[in-house]
């Protein structure tokens, strides 16, 4: 039972559980259904265009809808082929009459004001019937790259054709390069990187960018229509079917290249409470309110009520629609602690009925806990992780801070040489699932491991800021060393690795820590940096490839932590992993070693299992190619500010063919 701090109209209103809200289209007729239990009258208004500004805009018809008292649903069937016809509802609640787009809109005209009837079959790009989801067996097999549709290609360095820059269709361009170079960009770049999924910043319809001009920039965390693609990323926002088709083309292009698509969903608040279709259709129902005041745990002016029967149903219907109609492979929930535990668990169950591999994770916090309207016991925070499905992940901000210090300030974490929060890093390396080192997750599949996301300073900007001017050595090479240590943490830990697009080539927003409405000049990905920072990209790429060859790193079970022996001697972190049931096509033993000091340091590999005698170093300060760099013995020291990854020689020889004697340096030859 959820503790609520506001009135509950679920006790008054009849609800509806069928899946035909919105419209059901056929060539012969379209049936409209809208849940409006408090309304005394609902009119259906049909228009020839999607906005009143358009030339030739005409009201085609106004139809009276009929209420089913048992469910509170208003219904009207209109004969004829209505594909491309725009519509609104005029809802009379008390003495207030509001014209609104449909809560269940699937298509809209420009800037969201009118819904559109769409024959979805006609929006399918060529080959769509053969398009397949990109799923990984466990959440921990995913490697996520977070990108904003506009940032991806808005710069001329993207090499994308001018008419597609900043749009969905930029994702369909192949063989793009930084102009006058051979450096790959966009889709062809991603193919080489080895990530499994892109996570797109909001791509549902949001309100902060005028779709007609696209002059302003916004991340898009201000939803207007949850089941409609955003129009400003389309080549034609006026005709509702175009953006749907172009969105599907984007998904298909990524899928064709083996990359899955995760949507960032923001069901926790809307662009405006009063002006939203939800409030106009059923006043004081879909949002948490005290009297006329919207509670504001989102920090954005209002918070929706996931625990209400019809909003919970809406979230589930909407998510299923994105999976089934657009072939979306996973969801990242913004401010997930605004939602209640029961809703998120039901979402997991409902999506499992489609496919249990659909990814789910989110931010385990709100912007203001005190104004959330549901108790701390009921919301999806880390402390309630044990109440959630083990396949609902959460961003591990403890690990993030332990790695690099505070997100926007000049404090240091482990990679800049601080030992203050090392325990957070150790716990994070074990997917926040270890009783010994610190635990909030049930399993590593609940833990998203990251150092940077769209919020806050980019990792590069954070490193520039936190390497204080009086430091011993703050040259760029030093910062690259720190970035490599961070990459090692992210990719060589249990859990779900996640990174901001371009983290791997020193992405900068020039110190802008909250660029949500900053211009393209700040937000655009500068693809020319892939040339200057190729060494860093190669390091990430190598670690990604190694991760895929060691299943203990992607083990999502509770047992994974017990096969890893972590040590920290005040300087060096060493995690020795015994993958005792390794298959023939992967490594059996691996050690991940990190040194954040300015001196070379000894370290020791420890395990509760018998360890092999022969080891090879496959990652060091300079290279993460995965090739054997040198032999290893226990007298070896690790270079300052660097990482080592070591694997057992038997597995290496089995995987790569035996290393010819004397072709790699023995440990005694090493120049450390
Ligand atoms: Ca919009």
Image (tube, rainbow, N blue to C red):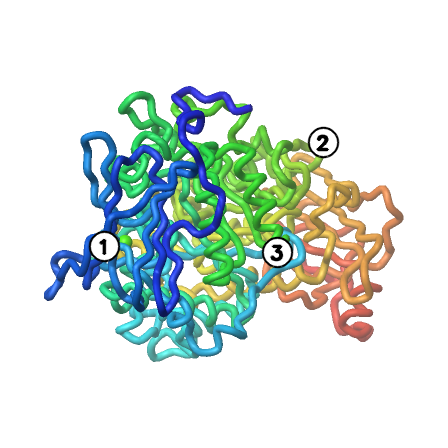
Between 223 and 599, the one nearer to me in the picture:
223
Query: Earlier along the polypeptide chain: callout 1 or callout 2?
Result: 1
Residue 496, placed above or below residue 408: below
Q: From the image, state whether disc 1 or disc 2 is nearer to you.
A: 1
Query: Earlier along the polypeptide chain: callout 3 or callout 1?
Result: 1
Which residue sits at x=42%, y=40%? 466
Q: Are marks 1 and 2 in contact (CB under 8 Å)?
A: no
Which residue sits at x=61%, y=52%? 353
Q: Quick check: 214 left or right of 420?
A: left
**Crowd rating for badge 2 (residues with CA inside 10 Å; few <14, some 14–19, many 20+):** few
Q: Which residue is mark 1?
A: 111
Query: Earlier along the polypeptide chain: callout 2 or callout 3?
Result: 3
Q: Are marks 2 and 3 in contact (CB under 8 Å)?
A: no
The quarter of the rendered structure image containing the C terminus is bottom right
Q: Which residue is mark 3?
A: 355
Q: Element at badge 2?
A: loop
Q: Is residue 470 visible?
A: no
Residue 122 screen position, x and y as percent: 38, 72
Q: Is residue 150 visible?
A: yes
**Crowd rating for badge 3 (residues with CA inside 10 Å; few <14, some 14–19, many 20+):** some
């Amino acid at each position: 039972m959820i503790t609520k701090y506001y009135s509950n109209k679920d006790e008054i209103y009849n609800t509806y559980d069928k899946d035909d809200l919105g419209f059901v289209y056929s060539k012969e007729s379209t049936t409209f259904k809208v849940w409006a239990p408090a309304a005394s009258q609902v009119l259906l208004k049909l228009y020839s265009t999607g906005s009143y500004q358009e030339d030739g805009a005409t009201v085609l018809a106004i139809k009276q809808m009929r209420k089913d008292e048992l469910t509170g649903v208003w219904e009207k069937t209109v004969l004829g082929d209505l594909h491309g016809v725009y519509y609104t509802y005029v809802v009379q609640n008390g003495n207030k009459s509001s014209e609104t787009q449909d809560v269940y809109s699937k298509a809209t005209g420009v800037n969201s004001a009118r819904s559109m009837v769409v024959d979805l079959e006609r929006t399918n790009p060529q080959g769509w019937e053969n398009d397949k989801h990109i799923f990984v067996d466990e959440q921990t097999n995913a490697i996520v790259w977070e990108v904003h549709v506009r940032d991806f290609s808005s710069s001329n360095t993207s090499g994308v054709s001018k008419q597609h820059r900043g749009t969905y269709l930029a994702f369909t361009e192949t063989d793009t390069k930084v102009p006058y170079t051979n450096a790959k960009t966009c889709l062809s770049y991603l193919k080489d990187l080895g990530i499994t999924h892109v996570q797109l910043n909001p791509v549902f319809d949001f309100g902060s960018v005028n779709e007609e001009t696209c002059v302003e920039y916004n991340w898009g965390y201000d939803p207007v229509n949850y089941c409609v693609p955003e129009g400003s990323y389309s080549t034609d926002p006026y005709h509702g079917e175009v953006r749907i088709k172009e969105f599907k083309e984007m998904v298909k292009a990524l899928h064709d290249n083996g990359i899955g698509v995760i949507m960032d969903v923001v069901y926790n608040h809307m662009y405006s409470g009063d002006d939203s279709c939800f409030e106009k259709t059923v006043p004081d129902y879909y949002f948490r309110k005290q009297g006329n005041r919207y509670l504001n745990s989102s920090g954005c002016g209002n918070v929706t009520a996931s625990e209400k029967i019809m909003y919970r149903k809406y979230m589930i219907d909407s998510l299923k629609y994105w999976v089934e109609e657009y072939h979306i492979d996973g969801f990242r929930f913004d401010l997930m602690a605004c939602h209640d535990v029961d809703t998120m668990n039901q979402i997991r169950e409902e999506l499992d009925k489609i496919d249990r591999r659909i990814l789910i994770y989110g931010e385990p916090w709100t912007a203001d806990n005190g104004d959330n309207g549901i108790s701390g016991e009921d919301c999806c925070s880390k402390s309630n992780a044990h109440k959630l499905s083990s396949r609902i992940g959460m961003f591990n901000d403890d690990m993030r801070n332990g790695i690099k210090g505070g997100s926007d300030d000049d404090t240091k974490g482990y990679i800049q040489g601080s030992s203050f929060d090392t325990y957070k890093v150790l716990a994070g390396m074990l997917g926040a699932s270890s009783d010994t080192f610190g635990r909030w997750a049930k399993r590593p599949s609940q833990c998203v491991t990251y150092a940077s996301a769209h919020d806050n300073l980019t990792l590069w900007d954070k490193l520039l800021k936190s390497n204080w001017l009086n430091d011993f050595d703050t040259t760029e090479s030093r910062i690259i060393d720190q970035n490599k240590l961070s990459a090692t943490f992210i990719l060589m830990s249990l859990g779900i690795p996640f990174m901001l697009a371009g983290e791997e080539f020193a992405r900068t927003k020039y110190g802008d820590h909250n660029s949500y409405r900053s211009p393209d000049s700040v937000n655009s990905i500068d693809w020319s940096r892939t040339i200057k920072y190729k060494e860093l990209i190669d390091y990430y790429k190598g670690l990604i490839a190694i991760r895929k060859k060691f299943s203990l790193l992607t083990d999502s079970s509770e047992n994974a932590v017990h096969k890893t022996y972590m040590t920290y001697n005040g300087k060096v972190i060493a995690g020795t992993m015994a993958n005792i049931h390794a298959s023939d096509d992967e490594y059996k033993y691996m050690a991940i070693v990190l040194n954040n000091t300015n001196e070379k340091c000894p370290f020791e590999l420890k395990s509760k299992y018998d360890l092999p005698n022969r080891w090879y170093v496959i990652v060091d300060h300079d290279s993460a190619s995965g090739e054997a760099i040198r032999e290893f013995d226990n007298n070896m020291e690790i270079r300052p500010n660097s990482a080592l990854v070591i694997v057992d020689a038997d597995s290496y020889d089995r995987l790569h063919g035996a290393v010819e004697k004397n072709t790699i340096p023995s440990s005694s030859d090493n120049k450390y």
